[in-house]
Structures are given as structure tokens and as C-alpha cells.
Image (cartoon, rainbow, N blue to C red):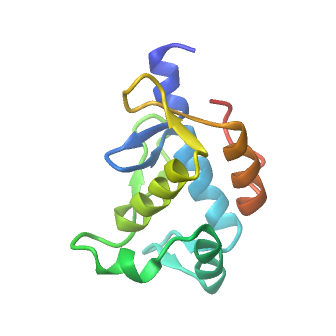
Amino acid sequence: MTATSDLAAARTCYDHLAGKLGVAVTSALVTAGALVVDGVQITERGSELFAILGLDIADARRKRRRFAYCCIDLTERHPHLAGSLGAALCRICFQARWIERVEGGRAIRVTAAGHRALSALLGADSLPAT
């Protein structure tokens, strides 16, 4: 892959997941009934799913920034999850070593463990190859 295709496949947008990966994760959360994109609302299923991930929704809500919103992806032209909720999800993915940086830039790749975990949790069979 080239640096441009690495960025299109998976990257961070400020502090949240973006590129094909960010769009796929957001889409999987919507499909799983965890998020409602219109106004970005977490459903009861979403609360359960984020708790399984170890994401503290109450803590994310207390941040001095917007809690959750959709950011239109630069390359995909579809929404990915942003705000303190998106940042917390990205942080958890890094901490669990489901994703890792590619040569110190914004590009990231999904690890083998990340593919297994995200597919199991989100039913995200369409996670991009990174």
C-alpha cells in the first residue's frame, strides 16, 4: 500500500477512527442497533456494547467537548463517529492493541487481534484490510 492508500484505509481524524475503518465501525454500530446516526444517540444495545468494550459512557459525557457526532469522512464521504465517544472508542482500540500506528503518522492498521475482536463485537465482516 502507498501512504495515501494507508490513510484512506484506516487513520485517525484528530483522536477518533477515520477512513474505511472508521466508516465501517460506525456503520457496524448502526447496523448492530448500538447507534442512531440522526443526532447520534446511543441505544440500550449501544450502552451494553460499549460497556463490554470497557468504555465509560458517563465519563465520555462529562468531557468539555461534544459527546458524539458524525464527522463526514474526507476520503469515504460517509460518516464516522467523532466527539468524546469516538475518541474513547479509538483509545480503547489502541489500548487493546486492536489497532496500531503505521510509521508514526495518522495512518493505522488493524491487527489480527483487532480483526477478530471487532468482527466478534460488531459483526463487522466488512472491516477493511489494512
**Most foreground residue, 87 or 97:** 97
On the picture, is 14 further left or further right than 70? left
**Image: 51 above or below 74:** below
- Residue at 49 percent of width and 60 percent of height: 89
- Residue at 72 percent of width and 53 percent of height: 117
Residue that lies at the very extreme toward the top in this rendered image: 2
Q: How many marks?
A: 0
**Image: 106 above or below 65:** above
Residue that lies at the very extreme toward the left in this rendered image: 64
Query: Within the image, what quadrant is residue 51 found in?
Result: bottom right
Whole-percent x, y for residue 60 in the image: 37, 74
**Image: 125 above or below 111:** below
**Most foreground residue, 20 or 61:** 61
Query: Within the image, what quadrant is residue 111 found in?
Result: top right
**Image: 9 above or below 54:** above
Whole-percent x, y for residue 97 in the image: 58, 45
Whole-percent x, y for residue 122 in the image: 71, 60
On the picture, is 21 further left or further right than 104? right
Whole-percent x, y for residue 11 in the image: 45, 37
Q: Tell me the quadrant of the picture where the C terminus can be found.
A: top right
Q: Tell me the quadrant of the picture where the N terminus can be found.
A: top right
- Residue at 41 percent of width and 41 percent of height: 12
Residue that lies at the very extreme toward the bottom in this rendered image: 44
